Image: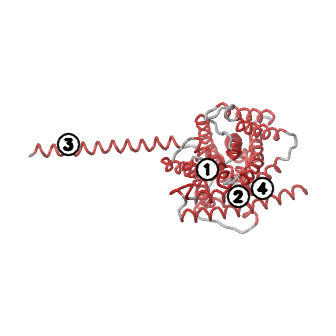
């Protein structure tokens, strides 16, 4: 009798042990699968924190303090919803966004997307190399040295690397965004006030508040993101059964992007706004102003973050444009192709890098006008691209059971309409700046 009880106890313990280890193996498999898929979502979202974006976040913190932190929560939702649809289309169809637009809506629509994308992204690339010049000048290095070296490094990385190698480098560059976290810590902000302003909306109706809010939302989501994200999942060969991991990648990317925005606003609010420096609109200028307020290390970290963001974005933006045009024309595209296999893809990338960096090196070039042009271009391009995405993702013949649910469609359309309205408002403001600047 006692022997029977002992045997039963041993069997139960053995069963629990086997169950424990099998659960452990399943958990490890899930983690390994996620690590294999992770990349496109995190990279795309964080590249959005480029030189232009950092300038807007700097302006938000310096002019309005912690007041706009509440907007980061709805912005995170908007970023996730729009990017998730593109990730889903890439994973389910195995095709890039430009490719799908050409197949489903014809060449005319694709041609408009290609031309607009090329012109707008060229303006964005110029802005990124301008960010390289501004950040390196803070370290005492001339733009005539820094910009050509940065352009050469970016070009060689893409030309010589495989998709996997380049992705690993991009993920490492994402980690360097943490320099803004340390910069914020050195600024000694009021963390309780920052937390309260994040959780509780503080809405005002004065013009400067509304303009800054519009700019903040308008710079969060750019059309190039959708094309690069979808192309990256396709190039990585992420299939339908890996869709849950792809969606998690996009979620992590959206949250990490907004966490960095939070630290930039907190840093500038705790220093520039507190000191009454409310008219700073340039990230390089902000880094200089941090020296007497938060110390040289805070300034260096802020400048390093700007340099990292600018080089990162100067690499990704031309890649996105090359994908848009090559997919739309039916040419080979992707980092796993050699130059001779995808000449159009690599020549487009090279032209964007050379022209973008070259414009920054022209003496007295009006960079602010180019930056405003890219904002206007994004505003014109964004509504069209978002509508294409919503029409495509709801096609049952294309997506099968992976079309939007009713709830997701409601959120997506509300997000899209709000985003389009705010972006068009930003376009109006940019045009006014252009007119006033020209008159001045």
Residue position for label 4: 376
- Foreground disc of the pair 1, 2: 2
Identify the secondary structure beneath mark 4: helix
Please give left or right for residue 239 compared with residue 356 in the image.
Answer: left
Give the numbered dot on residue 52.
none
**Tag 3, which secondary structure?**
helix
| Mark 1 vs mark 4, CA separation in Å | 23 Å
* Viewer-side label of 3, 2: 2
Q: CA distance from mark 4 to mark 2?
A: 14 Å
Disc 3 or 4, which lies upstream in sequence?
3
Return the residue at label 3: 10
Quadrant in the picture for residue 420? bottom right
Q: State how far apart marks 3 and 1 are (Cα).
A: 51 Å
CA distance separating discs 3 and 4: 72 Å
The answer to which of marks 1 and 2 sits earlier in the sequence is: 1
Instruction: Give the x, y percent position of residue 435.
Output: 87, 58
Disc 3 residue crowd, few under 14, some 14–19, many 20+, Cα 10 Å: few
Extreme left residue here? 1
* 10 Å crowding of disc 1: few (<14), some (14-19), many (20+): many
Residue hosting label 1: 257
> Can you see residue 10?
yes
Q: Nearer the viewer, mark 1 or mark 4?
A: 4
Mark 1 secondary-structure assignment: helix
Say which residue label 2 marks: 384
């Amino acid at each position: 009798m006692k022997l029977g009880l002992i045997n039963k106890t041993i069997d139960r313990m053995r069963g629990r042990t086997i169950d424990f280890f099998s659960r452990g193996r399943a958990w490890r498999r899930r983690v390994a699968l996620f690590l294999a898929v992770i990349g496109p979502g995190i990279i795309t979202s964080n590249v959005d924190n480029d030189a232009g974006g950092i300038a807007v976040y700097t302006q938000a913190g310096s002019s309005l303090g912690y007041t706009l932190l509440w907007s980061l929560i709805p912005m995170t939702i908007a970023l996730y919803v729009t990017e998730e649809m593109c990730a889903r289309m890439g994973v389910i169809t195995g095709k890039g966004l430009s490719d799908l637009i050409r197949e489903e809506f014809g060449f005319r629509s694709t041609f408009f997307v290609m031309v607009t994308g090329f012109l707008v992204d060229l303006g964005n690339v110029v802005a990124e190399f301008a960010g390289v010049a501004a950040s390196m000048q803070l370290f005492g290095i001339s733009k005539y040295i820094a910009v050509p070296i940065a352009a050469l490094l970016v070009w060689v990385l893409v030309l010589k690397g495989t998709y996997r190698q380049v992705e690993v480098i991009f993920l490492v560059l994402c980690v360097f965004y943490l320099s803004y976290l340390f910069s914020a810590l050195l600024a000694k902000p009021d963390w309780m006030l920052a937390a309260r302003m994040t959780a509780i909306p503080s809405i005002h109706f004065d013009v400067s508040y509304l303009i800054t809010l519009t700019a903040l939302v308008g710079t969060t989501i750019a059309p190039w993101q959708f094309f690069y994200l979808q192309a990256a999942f396709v190039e990585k060969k992420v299939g339908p059964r890996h869709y849950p991991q792809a969606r998690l990648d996009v979620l992590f990317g959206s949250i990490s992007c907004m966490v960095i925005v939070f630290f930039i606003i907190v840093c500038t609010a705790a220093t520039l706004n507190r000191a009454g420096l409310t008219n700073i609109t340039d990230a390089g200028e902000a880094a200089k102003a941090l020296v007497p307020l938060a110390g040289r290390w805070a300034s260096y970290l802020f400048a390093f973050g700007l340099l990292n963001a600018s080089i990162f974005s100067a690499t990704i933006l031309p890649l996105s444009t090359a994908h848009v045009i090559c997919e739309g024309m039916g040419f080979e595209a992707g980092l796993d192709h050699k130059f001779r296999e995808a000449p159009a893809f690599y020549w487009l990338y090279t032209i964007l890098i050379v022209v973008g960096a070259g414009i920054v090196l022209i003496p007295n070039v009006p960079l602010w006008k180019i930056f405003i042009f890219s904002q206007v271009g994004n505003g014109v391009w964004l509504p069209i691209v978002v509508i294409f995405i919503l029409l495509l993702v709801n096609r049952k013949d294309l997506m099968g059971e992976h079309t939007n649910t009713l709830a997701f469609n409601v959120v997506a359309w509300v997000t899209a309409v709000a985003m389009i309205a705010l972006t068009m408002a930003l376009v109006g403001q940019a045009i006014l700046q252009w007119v006033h600047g020209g008159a001045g």
